[in-house]
Image (cartoon, coloured by chain):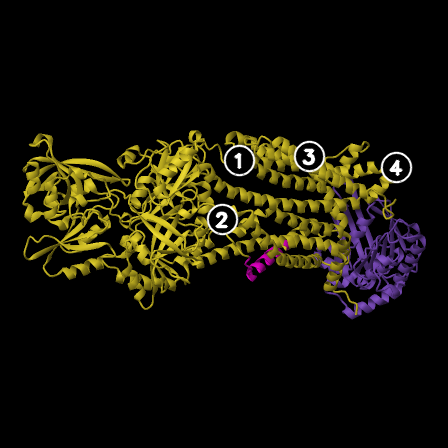
Chain colours: A purple, B yellow
Amino acid sequence: MTSAHSCEPIAELDGISKTYRFEDGAVLSDLSLCIMSGQTVAITGPSGSGKTTLLNIIGTLDLPDNGAIKLFGSDILTLSEIDRARLRNQEIGFVFQSHRLLPQCTVLENILLPTLAGSIPLSASEAENRARDLLEQTGIAELADRYPDTLSGGQRQRAAIARALLFHPKLLLCDEPTGALDHENATRLAELLQSIQIHQKTAIVIVTHSQELAETCQIQYSLKDGKLYSTEECTP
Amino acid sequence: MSKITHWRYILQTLRHHRLRHLGLAISVAVCTAVITGGLLIGDSLRFTLQQQINNRIGNSSILIDCTTHPVSRELSTAINGDASITATGLSKTQAVLSFESNQGITTQAVVWGINPSFTSVKPLSVFPDQNEAILSPSLADATGLRRDDEFSLRALKPDAHSKTQLGSSRKFITLRLRVRDILPASELSFTPMQTAPQSLFVNADTAEKLSGGKIDFILVSQGTRADVASALRENFSLADAGLSLADCKQTQTEVATKILTSSDLFLPDPFLKLTKTLPNAQPVFSYFINSIEPSEQDTRSSSASTPYSFISTLNLLKSGEIALLQWVADDLHVTAGDRVRLTYYVLQKQSLIEQSRMFRIVRILPTEENADPALTLPLPGMSGANSCNDWDPDFPIDLARIRKKDEAYWNDYRGSPKAFVSFADAQDMWRNDYGGFTGIRFDIPNGSNKTLRQEITQSISPDMFGISISNIRQDLLHAVEHGVDFSGLFIGLSMFLLLSPLAMAAMLCALSVLARSDELNMLHALGIEKRIRFRLLLIEHGIVVTCGAALGALLAPAWTAAILYGLQSVWTDVTGAVSADLHLTPSTLLIGFFSSLLIGLVCIGLAFYYSTPASDQSHRQFHVEHKIHTMRLSRFRIVLYSLCALFGLSPFPVLYFFSLSAGVLFICGTLILAYVIIIFYLSCTRKRKTARKTIGFIQKTMRHRAGICTLLFAAIASGLYVVLAVSLNTPTVQNPTDYSSGTGGFAYLAKTTLPLSFNPADPLEIKKYHLPPYPWKENAIAFFTTGSGQANCLNLNRVTTPQLLGIPKDALKHRFSFSSSFKDYPANWSALEFPDTHETDQETIPAIADANVIEWGLGKKLGDTIEYTGEPGHRFSIRLVAALNASVFQGMILIDEATLLRHFPTSARRDFILAANHATDTNASSIRQNIAEALKPWGPQITDTSDYLNTFLNVEKTYLSIFLLLGTLGLLLATGTIAGICIREFSLRQNESALLHALGFSRLRRTLLLACPYLISTCSGCIWAVGCSLITAIYRLPEDFLPTSAAITTAIVLIFAIAILFTAYFFSKPSPKHTL
C-alpha cells in the first residue's frame, strides 16, 4: 500500500477504557490511538479481544467509560446524539462483515441510503451522480438496478463499500470486510480499499483476522488484553 | 432519476414486507370492525328506540299530566283554542280484555280515549266510532283479535278512580267493543320502555263510560312550554280543580255563607293557606259516621242509636265537646251535659277500620235552622240518592239499620250534619293521607259571589293538584340517550376479540423490528438519526394500520348486521326482541376508524419503543444490555419468587377473612393464574446445568425461548380461563324455596291490571267483603305500587324515577338477602324505618333496590338520592340505603308502605302480590288456578317466582353467552396468532433441525425435540386454566363439571398437541436451504 502521509489527525483516542458488566476484566484498558488522514490501519487480535468495540467507539456507535476521544478535532463525548449521527453520516463510512444491503432496495438505492438522513451536503442529482461514479469505481456499474439478492457475495460487499463512500468520508471503518468472502473476492476487495485510500485520501481502519489483509495496511496493531500493540512504529 | 427518498424507501419496504404487513393490516381491520361495529350497534338500537318514540307520541312534544287529578274535556278544548297551541285531550284507563274467540283468555290493556283532534298529533287512517276500538298490533298479537272481532272490556267504574273513597270500590264496568282496525299508530305510551304497549283507542264518547268524561293527559304538538303553562293556568277552572262553591243556609240577612268543597272530598293541607289568604274563610271538616250513641251511664233507652249520620265542625266548640241537632237529641233522649259516642270508619292503608270516641254534649241546636245540606260530605253513591234505601256507597253499610225516622230526616234535610264537633277533634279523628279537611266556609257580604269565585280561581294553580307539564319528547329521548349503552357494552363484551388482534398487531410490530434489527442498525451506522428511523418505521406501519382501519370500517357494517341478527334471533332476552335495523352514520364510522387508528398507532408505537434498544447504541450494546438484564433477573430471582408467592397466596387470606362470594373467588383465580404465569416464566429462564439428557435439552431450549414459551402459556391459559370461569359462574336461581333467595320463598307473583280494592292477604278483609276463601292463607303479601317504568335489565331506556313499591312493616322479615348497605344503615328491611340524618331541603326517605338495578339500571350507588313528585305535586327524595341480591323486585324502588301511601294516597295501587309457599305449594297446580280464579276480576298475570326471576337472569346469561361467543372468537384468533408464532419458530429453527439431522437424530425424535417446548407451554396453560377456573366456582360446581372439564381439557390439549406435532414434523424435514 502506498503511503500518503499527512499531519492532520483524524481520530485521537486517549486512555480510553470500556468494561462490560458481564465480562470479568476491561475490554479496552487505557487505550490510546491516533489515526492520521490518509492512513490505513489494521487492527488484529483474537476473538473477543475488543476489536469491534474499539471500532464502534471510533465510529461513535459506542462510547468509552473513561478517556477522551476526538474525531476530526471534535470531542465526541461532548457531542449530542444528533451531532454524532451527522458525523457518522458525512464523515465516517462503515463496512460490515455482512454487507447489510436492504433487500427491498436496488443497489443504487442502497448506495443512496445515507441521503435519507436529511441534511446532506449534496443535492439529489449530485448524490446520484456520485453513487454512479462509485459504482463505476467499484466495478459494479451494470448492477445499479439489480436487487441485492441477485448479486454474489463479492458484488454485495463492493456495493456496501460504495454506500460507505457516498459522501467521501474522511474515515472508513471496516469490520472484517473480507470475512464472508472467498480468497479471490477478498483480494479484489483489498485492492479496492487500497485504491480508495490512494485516490480519495481516506483514512481506513480495518478490523480483521486476515493477516494478508492486515499486511496491506500502513500500520498494524494487535489488540490483546484491552491494549494495542504496534507491529511497526507509529507516531502518535 | 432514481433517487431514494423517505417515501420511496417506505413504499419499497411496504412492498417487500407485504405478507408481514398483511397480518398487521388484518389485525387492525378486525380491531376496527369490532370497535366500529360496537358503536354502530349502539347507534342502531338508539336510532330504533328514537324511531319508536316518534311512532308512539307522534309529533307531540309537551305533555300535561293530569293523572293525579283528571280534568274536564273543556280544558283541553280551551287550550287547543289558543292560537299558538295545538293540543288534544286523552283519557287513559287500565282494562282487562276478555274475548270468547280465544277461549275466554283475558289480557291487560291500556284504553286511550281520543277525540278527532288527536289526528293532529298522530294521523289515523280510520277513527273509531261508538263502541269501536283500534288495537295496537302487539295487543292484537296477544289476543289473536282481528278486524271486526268483538271483545269485552272490563274496567273500574269512573267514580272508582276518584279520591272520593272512604273505602275502595269494587265496581266494574264492562263494555262490548268491536275491532275497527289494527294500526301501529295506536301504540301510544309515555313510559320509557321499548316493549310495544298493548293499547287500544276508543273515541271520547266510549271513553266517557270509563273515565266519566275526564281526561288524564293533554298532548301538545305545537306550542312552547311557556305558552302551554300560561294557557293551562288561564283556563284552569274551579270545575277542573274539582271544587264547587255552594250556598249555605243563610242565618244573617246581610251576610251570605258559602262553602267550597271538593269532588275529592278531602282537601290536602296546602289548601289551608286559602283560609288565610281569602277573606272570612275558615276550614270545615265534614264526615260520615256509623252511629251516634249515648254513653252507657247516660242511656235512657237501651236501644238508642242514631245510625249513619253526617257530622261537621263548628268553631265555637272546644275539644271533647259536641253540639247535636234537636232531632238527634230527641232520638237519643239526651240533653246538654250528657255524653255520646261517635262510631266511624277511618282509612288506614286504603282499608277501613272502625273506631269510636266519646263527646260531651254542650249544645242542642234547633234542627230547622241548623240543618244545612251544604255542609254535607258529597259521598258518591249517597249524595244524589232520593232515599236511604238507594244508598250505594263504596264502603260497607247495613241498610237494615236505617229506620223510618232516618228516612224522614233524609227526605227533609238530605245529608245535613246532625252534630258538630270542634275542627281540631275532627282532624284528630278523621284526617287521612288524602287531606285534613273537606271544605272552606266563607262569610261574605251579599252579592259578592262572583268576586269570591274569581279570588279562589286566582288562588289555585294546576300544580297544587299534581298537574304537571313535561317536555315528553325530550324526556323520552333523554331516557334513550342515557339508557343501556350498547356501544360500550358490546365493545366490552368483545374485549377478547379486541385484545387478540391488538396483541397480534403489537407482536407483529415487535417481531418486525426484531427481524429488521440488522437494517435498523445499518441505518444507525449510516448516521440516520433515531427520530428519522422511528419516523420511517412509524409511517410505514402507520400506512398499514390506516389501510387496516379503513378495511375494518368497511367490514364494520357487516359485523354490526351479524350482531343485530343475533340480538333479534338468539339473544332476544337482551333487547326484548326490538327489531333494530342497521343504522349507519358517517360520524360513527369515522370515530371507529380514527379511534382504532389511534389505538393501532399507540400499540405499534409501544411495540417499537420496547423492542428497539433503550439507548441509541450499537446492536452489540443492545445484546450486552439484554445480558445484563438477564443477569439482574437472576440475582433478584429469590426476591421475585418471594413476592410472587405472596401475590399468589394473597387470595387465601382474602378467602379466609371475607365471604366466599363469586367476585372474591374470581379475583383469587385470576391472581393465582397471574402468579402461575410469572412462575412459568421464571422456571423457563432458570439456568440449567446440563443439556446432556433430552429433558435438559428441552429445558435449555425453553430457557433460550422463554419469552415465546411464556407468551404461548399466558395466551392459552388466560383465554381458556376467562371462557371457563365465565361459563362456570353463569348465574342461576338459587334454591327458590329458600327464604333468603330472590323469590323470598314465595311461589307465585301476581300482578293485576286493575288495582285490588282490598287486601287479599288479610283474612278479616276477605270476610268483610264476603269474598271466597283464598288459597294462600297467611303466605301472601299484597303490595302497593305507584308510577310506571321499571329500571330493570329488560328496559333499554334509563328510567329516572322507577316504580315505587311499598313494603309493609315486618312483612318480609327474614326473606330475601342483602348485598350491602349505606354507612350506618343495616343491611336488612329495618333500613326502611331508619330516619335520614342528612340535612336536605326536602324530606328524604330511605329506600332499597336490587344491587344491579342501583348500579346498572339507575347508574347510581348506595347513598345517592332520587327525586320524586308526590301528591299533590310536592317534591321529596328517596335515598338508596341498602341493596338486595337479585330478587323479584328487580326494577323497582322499595320504600316503607306507610310512607308510600302518605305520599301517593290516591295513585298508589295494590296490584303486586307475592303468594304461596314455594317449598310446599309450587307443585299443587290447583293453587295457581285458585289464585287466578280469585283475582280474575282484576285481570291477574300470575308467574312462578322462579320463572319471573329467570327472565332477569336470562338477560345476564345472554350477555355472558355473547361474551363467551365473542371471547371464543377472540381465542380462535389468538390461537391463529399462536399457530403463526409456532410456524415462524419452527421455520427459524430449521437450521437446528438440520444439525440434529446431521447428528443422526431420527425424524420422530427431531420432531419431539422441536415441539416439546411449545407442547409443554400450551398443554400446561390449558391445565392451569382449568384449575384456576375451578377455583372461581368452587362452591357451586355443577355435578358433571369434573368429567366435562376433563373431557374438554383433554380435547383442547389433544388438538394443540396434534397441531404442534404436525407442524414440527413438517419442519423437521431437512431442506436444501437449511443444511450444515
- In percent of width and height, residue A172 lies at 83, 58
Q: Nearer the viewer, residue B425 or B216?
A: B216
| First in residue order: circle 1 vs circle 3 | 1
- In percent of width and height, residue B578 lies at 50, 52
State how many labels appear: 4
Q: Which residue is mark 4?
A: B1000
Q: Which residue is mark 2?
A: B576
Image quarter of residue B982: top right
Q: CA distance from mark 1 to mark 3?
A: 26 Å
With A225 as the anchor, is B922 left or right in this view?
left
SS assignment for the magenta stretch, majority: helix
Q: CA distance from mark 3 to mark 2?
A: 39 Å
**Magenta segment boundaries in residue numbering:** B582-600
Badge 3 amino acid = Thr
Q: Chain of mark 2?
A: B
Tag 4 secondary structure: loop
**Tag in front: 4 or 1:** 1
Tag 3 secondary structure: helix
| Residue extending farthest right | A184
Can you say which quadrant of the picture contains the C terminus of chain B?
top right
| First in residue order: circle 1 vs circle 2 | 2
| First in residue order: circle 4 vs circle 1 | 1
Q: Which residue is mark 3?
A: B1050
Q: Nearer the viewer, residue A234 or B353?
A: B353
With B845 as the anchor, is B1074 left or right in this view?
right
Q: Are marks 4 and 1 in contact (CB under 8 Å)?
A: no
Q: Chain of mark 3?
A: B
